[in-house]
Structures are given as C-alpha cells and as structure tokens.
Image (cartoon, rainbow, N blue to C red):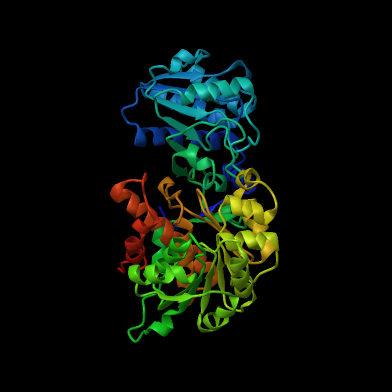
Amino acid sequence: MPAIRALYDVDALRVLEARGIAFLDGDGFALMARAGEAAWRCVLAHWPQARRIVVVCGPGNNGGDGYVLARHAYMSGCEVRVHCLPAHVPASALAKRACDDYLASGGCLVESLDAMADADLIVDALFGIGLSRAPDAATSALIQAINAQPAPVLALDVPSGVDARNGHVPGVAINALCTLQFIAAHRGLSTGDALEHAGELDLATLDLPATVFDGVEASAHACTGDALQAMLPLRARNSHKGRNGHVLCVGGDHGGGGAVLLAAEAALRCGAGLVSVATRGEHVPALLSHRPEVMAHAVASVEDLPALLARADVVAIGPGLGQSEWGRGLFDAAMASEKPRVVDADALNLLAQAPRMLRPQDVLTPHPGEAARLLDCDTSHIQRDRFAAAQALCERYGAQIVLKGAGTIIASPDARPVVMDAGNPGMAVGGMGDLLTGCIAALLAQGLSSRDAAIAGALLHAGAGDAAAREDGERGLLPSDLLPWLRRLANPVRP
C-alpha cells in the first residue's frame, strides 16, 4: 500500500465510472463484467478454499456486479446460491442482463435465509455508493441476518448501509471482513463508523487507463506511517538544541499535572531541543523527579507567564489546564501571544466559550466532543460527517484542525484534508491527546510547517500506538507506553 493515496468522493467516483464506460466504447456492461471478474479474483485471493458461496444481490448495478461474480464462481465449480429479496429483483437493464447470464449458466436464485447457514463466504452486493439513507425494514433484517452468520463477508464497493460520502451509518450496515472498492479508493470508507464495517480495504482499478482521472481531483488523501520518512529530515551534523526549538507546555491545574507532563515528554521524545512547563507549583517536584530534562516552572498567576512565553518558539496550551480563574488567565495570555500554538483539551473548551479567528500557523486538536462545542452542535452531528466538521472548524477558526478519532482527519484552510490510516481502539484512553499535543508542538518547533507538523505528529502518535499495541495488545494500552516508540518512529530508517 502506498504511503499516501488519493481518496475520492461519490461525485468524483460517478465521473470516473462514466469515463470508464466511455473508454469501453459506451458499453456499461463491459465495465460491470470487469467489476464482477475482479470480485471473483478477490475471492480467489482471500478465500481460495471457499466452495459454498452465497451472493446477496440488490436491485441496482452493485447487484449486477454480484451476479457476474456468482456466474464466475458457478462456472468454476463452486456451490453458489444467490439470495435476492422480492424487492431486490434487478431494476436496471445492466443488472437484469447480468442476472439472466447467471441463470442461463445454470445458477439459481433463493429467498430463504437458510441458504447462508453453511456458507464458506457471503458476498454483499446489495447497494453501492448511492445509498445515503437507512435501509428499509426488510433489508435491515437481511443485513442483520448476514452479520449473524459465522462466514466471512466480502463487500463489493461499499458495505451496504454505509454512506460512501462520509462513512456514516444511519441504520444497520454489513460487517465485512474485506471491502473491494472499484476504480478508486472511497473517501467515506476512511473514517468514522465505516472503519467498523469495511474491514480490509482492497482496490480494483478495472484496468482503466490513468487518463480517466484527468481533471478529476481527489477530495482527500490517506497517509500511512511510511510517509514519515519524507516528512522528517535528517538532522545536520552541526545541530544544536537551539536549532531544534523550544516548546512551552502550559497546563496542569490541580489534579492535571500528569497531562502536562505527558505533553512535555512527548515533545522531548519527538525531538524538541528544549521543553519548558508552566504549571502549578505543587507539580514541579514530581515533574523534575520523573523527567529532569523538563524545565518546570511554578506559575502562581498569569503575571508569571509572559517571560516564559518570550523564550519559547511554540506554545502547547491545554493539557490539564482546567477552566478555573488560573487556567483562564493562562489561556488568555497564551492566545494573545504571537507564537505558534497547539491548542488542546480545556484550552479548546475555553476557546469554544469565546470563539475567535486564529492563524494558519496554529493547530487545534479536538476530539468529537470538543469539536461539537467549538461548532455549537452535538457530537452526533460531528460524527455524521467528519470531513464536513473538520472543514467547518477550519472556516470558523482559520487554523489547522486535527479532528481526532477513528480515522483522524487533518484539515487545513488551503489544502485537501488528510486522513490517518493508522491508530487503534486501544488508544481510546485518557492522556493520549496530551501526547499528540506534545508531538505536534515538537515538530513545529523543529521547523515543520503547521500543516506538516499536524500530519507528521498525528502519524507519529498513531504509529506509536500501533507499535505498542502489537507488542502487548490494545486493551490496557497507556499513553506512557507510546513514549519509547515515539522516539523510534521519529527517526525513520533511511535506505
């Protein structure tokens, strides 16, 4: 899989499909035949021992792809059963032709759900990229019956029930072990609820030439950890700590000292030359005993902060900050500074209470709940369309946005969004966001642009989480478990 790959929205996918048909002299069935054959090759690659195959077909062209696959499987000697609800009989001319070809080859249609009971593989060919509503009652019952089977599920193009525009699941959806996308990678399968349903993502380009993509822009890009090598330059031999930047972490009200320490440690492990912490005096001894490399400063009131801000190159504001008078004062001082800022946690909540336009060099790192407060909506609205939410945050605040969660999205005022193809559920624990704040601040301090620092910081953070989870598992993963991996991944191996 490439380190960076293009993702396309539904409108672009429809244009590409139309161009693919034009390339095949206007023969839509020829493109359907290619899709069905590619699906059969996917079955052979992933489940070569499967002999009893159930294909669940819908009424449209996605169902037509399923009929083509079923015919290939039947002609290859498999025991094939195509399940088709009365409401799902082929409704398009292409799907009807594919169904007729399957029946003419000797195949049959079944309506009983019992057909799935002993299947080696179930193929979901119910709906493609066009479905944006919850399935009706009969289809929902069918999807639930498929999900209840022990057999693995291959979804064609999109797991039925997932909105391909944004990854939202408005009702029930297929739980696929693998989803085979056609022509180009789908933006909606990269984030949010879709990640729970799509499984492994494969892509069949249907042997269309690169020219079909001319003038069709990707709406987002997905990045894996392999992209870090190009983003993190080697250090000069004559490097010194001043060249690697000075990060000031501001936070740690009563009970929040651990949060600001995690941010500071992450900044050190990601290569900042100097890291200072402005926090409550009660936390200073613990910070120094645990991490003596941190320059910990007792800040009793906002009057103690300007001198620290003046010496810093980047300010990380929010971890453990709280919303008391103390935290509000430090927040106001940091937001008045001209230094680049990474804004997280309670600093985001304070910003939501008094919204203001920030600068492109600033980075906001909200989770969905914080994003909802920043946009004055509820969390479900954020999760329903994470791409739209990230873009709305960019427009309202003018900064780089790191919308955390499954399929973290980095949105910028002047560039296409980037989705993290990394991270795992074990990272859903308090303190993980504090690490991310430190990662991004350290990379900003080392000279990366705010956009690159947001992307590379999120990749470092997610990659460290994946590495730590591979070592000891997801459940019980702690933010501090990522610290050794941050250092390793911040030093990519050069060829």
- The residue that appears at 66% across and 33% down in the rendered structure is 133
Residue 279, image x, y percentages: 49, 70
Using the rendered view, name the quadrant where residue 168 is placed: top right
The foreground one among 319 and 341 is 319
Residue 227, image x, y percentages: 42, 62
Q: How many marks?
A: 0
Specify whether 17 is left or right of 72: right
Using the rendered view, name the quadrant where residue 495 is placed: bottom left
Specify whether 412 is left or right of 203: right
**Placement of 388 over or under 282, stated as above or below:** above
**Placement of 246 over or under 438, stated as above or below:** below
- The residue that appears at 42% across and 35% down in the rendered structure is 177
Residue 41 at least partly seen: yes
The foreground one among 1 and 389 is 389
**Placement of 284 over or under 197, stated as above or below:** below
Residue 310, image x, y percentages: 55, 83
**Placement of 474 over or under 453, stated as above or below:** above
Residue 354, image x, y percentages: 70, 63
The foreground one among 17 and 267 is 267
The foreground one among 42 and 404 is 404
- The residue that appears at 66% across and 69% down in the rendered structure is 358
Residue 394 at least partly seen: no
